[in-house]
Image (tube, coloured by chain):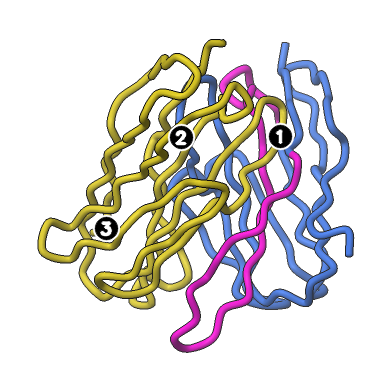
Chain colours: A blue, B yellow
Amino acid sequence: NAGVTQTPKFRILKIGQSMTLQCTQDMNHNYMYWYRQDPGMGLKLIYYSVGAGITDKGEVPNGYNVSRSTTEDFPLRLELAAPSQTSVYFCASSYRTSGSDETQYFGPGTRLLVL
Amino acid sequence: GNSVTQMEGPVTLSEEAFLTINCTYTATGYPSLFWYVQYPGEGLQLLLKATKADDKGSNKGFEATYRKETTSFHLEKGSVQVSDSAVYFCALSDTTNAGKSTFGDGTTLTVKP
């Protein structure tokens, strides 16, 4: 199993450009998440999904969009990139049922620099 | 709402020293508690977990006990190594919170030879 994979690993964007961060998991997990981690800070939840076709906002959704057309994929779209979106982005997944302990499995991250 | 408060860092220790990183939580339900570790340049990975009161999670010499009476889940290791240098995150997962976990801000540990 590859687990959670993310592409690209690093990207430089100009202000106003857009891009999609890719995330794929091969563990048949129902829940998927996008976080951002700013330097020296903890994780902030951007969006999450409880299953294919269902997404919801986290703490910091502004400037981002997501979709979940399949169980495996959960891409994050940045429209009109701004310097404030410079961060490291982590995708995670978990298998959640009633009473499960919800361990999250993280990808290696995408480092984004907006100039 | 739920919250996790971690001991502020950074923490610098000499090799073979004893480690404690404090973590306390606030939750409305009956959460599961986790410690995740993030090595430089990598994503988070599960270090240990405990799913109910008085459970002890352990892995790689690290331990943490789920204390409901003090709402705490402190991480301990008896003898740290240079390879333990990383950022440690305390987290909780609450079945009443629609699938969202709550993470602490992380504590950076540096172990010097």
Q: Which residue reaches farthest bottom?
A: A98
Question: Foreground mark, 2 or 1?
Answer: 1
Does residue B76 lie above or below A37 as drawn?
below
Chain letter of mark 2 equals: A
Q: Amino acid at mark 3?
A: Asn
Q: Earlier in the sequence, mark 3 or mark 1?
A: 3
- Secondary structure type for disc 3: loop
Distance between the alpha carbons at the discs numbered 2 and 1 = 14 Å
Check whether the beta carbons of the residues at disc 3 and disc 1 lie within 8 A of each other. no
Residue under pointer 2 = A42
Measured as percent of width and height from the top left, residue B85 is found at 56, 24
Relative side of B99 to A67, left or right: left
Q: Quadrant of the C terminus of chain B?
A: top right
Binning the other alpha carbons within 10 Å of mark 2 as few (below 14), some (14 to 19) or many (20 upward) gives: some
Distance between the alpha carbons at the discs numbered 3 and 1 = 26 Å
Q: Amino acid at mark 2?
A: Gly
Q: Which residues are magenta?
A: A80-108
